[in-house]
Image (cartoon, helix red, strand yellow):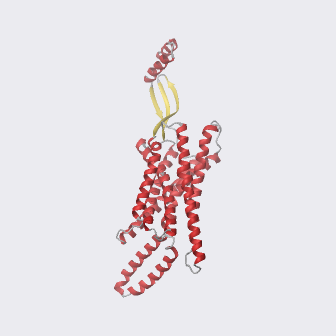
Amino acid sequence: MEQVEFHHELWRNDTEDERGQLGLEYRAKMEITDVLPPPNHENRQVLVMAGTYMLLFLLGTSGNVAVLTTIYHVARSNRGSLDNTLIYVIVLSCVDFGVCVSLPFTVIDQILGFWMFGTVICKLHAVLENFGKILSSLIITAMSIDRYVSVCHSQRKWLRSRRLAITILTGLAFYAMITLCPFLWSFRARELVLFEKETAPLKLTRMTIEKCTMVNISSFIFTLFTIYLFIFCYCFPLSLVTFFYAKLLKRLRQHARRFKSSRIPLMRISLYTLAVACLYFLCWTPFWLATVYAVYLEYAGDKNSDVPPIFVYFMYFIHALPFTNSAINWILYGALNGQLQVRTMSNNSNSLTNLAEPFGMTSTVQKHQEGETIQKGKDVSFFSCK
């Protein structure tokens, strides 16, 4: 009866403002029940994505921790001696570790279908993922310049000093944070009402979820921001990586032709350099092309068209590529770092020497280990020289 009287009173009013006010008063009297949607654990696409992301999480976190642990033991055995190359590797491993740590939150969000961690963790998740991705690509660019300088301008010691490396890394982190600050600050846990129905008089049932998403940013501003990131955080770094690694290989080939008896492993260095550049290109190019294409569809596409399942798999795959880059960077920049290998071998030889000393075998072990270390050093020291 009360509901009928409300509707009669509502329609007797002349203005929309009065009707809206009465609607709010009526809604305030209602008993609202919130329910959650069913989880997506039976969705094959979500399960494939979750399995892939968890593999990347395990690979990235364990690998980066292993590299950081190795560098810690190397630095401690050398009484805190860290050059600029290892400083770059340390910061890159820490940043990539943070990116990989954000993956479980993404997996839980996709499986449940909603964000359950609140606004604070939402902002932290955005920082770890987005800030880490951008800073990781900028550090890789700085490392390509550092390796070019180490080979082509080795006489300029100040260009490879620890102070300059720390200054560059601090500047890159500051640039990435300032660039992404408006974007990251807008992230929060936002409540979305998917469905609501009045199931009884003065009783409303709603299906609500929370999503970690951006708020208070217009589509136009987001488009400009995306284009800016595409140019200055992808195109420009990719051009620098390609340029300096190409100059590096050219210099090495000139050196090999000039000194026929050189023991520089040109083929291995060339393949290593090509792998670094190709990994960066393959992991980031599809992601940014898909991002730019999504911005294009925002203005020119049909928003009501159905999305085929294969396209969903394809987008999941593309979104996983930057995480893949962070998950395996430690292999190229840490485990395959020639300088770190030589230092680790040197530490192992010292340990074997100390072990053999009580048995009178010190000289034999030293000669054997020094021979291996020198031979290994000849293979990799040119690419990692100071």
Q: Position of residue 118 (x, y in %)?
A: 42, 41
In this view, the residue farthest toward the top is 12
| Residue 93 visible in image | yes
- Answer above or below: position of 12 versus 189: above
- Residue positioned 55% across, 59% down in the render: 241
Q: Where is residue 127 in the image (x, y as percent from the top left)?
A: 45, 48
Q: Position of residue 227 (x, y in %)?
A: 56, 45
Question: In the image shown, does 151 or 363 lie closer to the viewer?
Answer: 151
- Point out the image quarter for the C terminus: bottom left
- Residue positioned 53% across, 57% down in the render: 325
| Residue 336 visible in image | no
Question: In the image shown, does 281 or 141 lie closer to the viewer?
Answer: 141
Q: Where is residue 54 in the image (x, y as percent from the top left)?
A: 51, 55
- Answer above or below: position of 93 versus 191: below
- Residue positioned 48% across, 22% down in the render: 201
Q: In this view, does 16 lie to the left or right of 290?
A: left
Q: In which quarter of the image is residue 91?
A: bottom left
The number of callouts visible is 0
- Residue positioned 37% across, 72% down in the render: 78
In this view, the residue farthest toward the front is 156
Q: Quadrant of residue 368?
A: bottom left
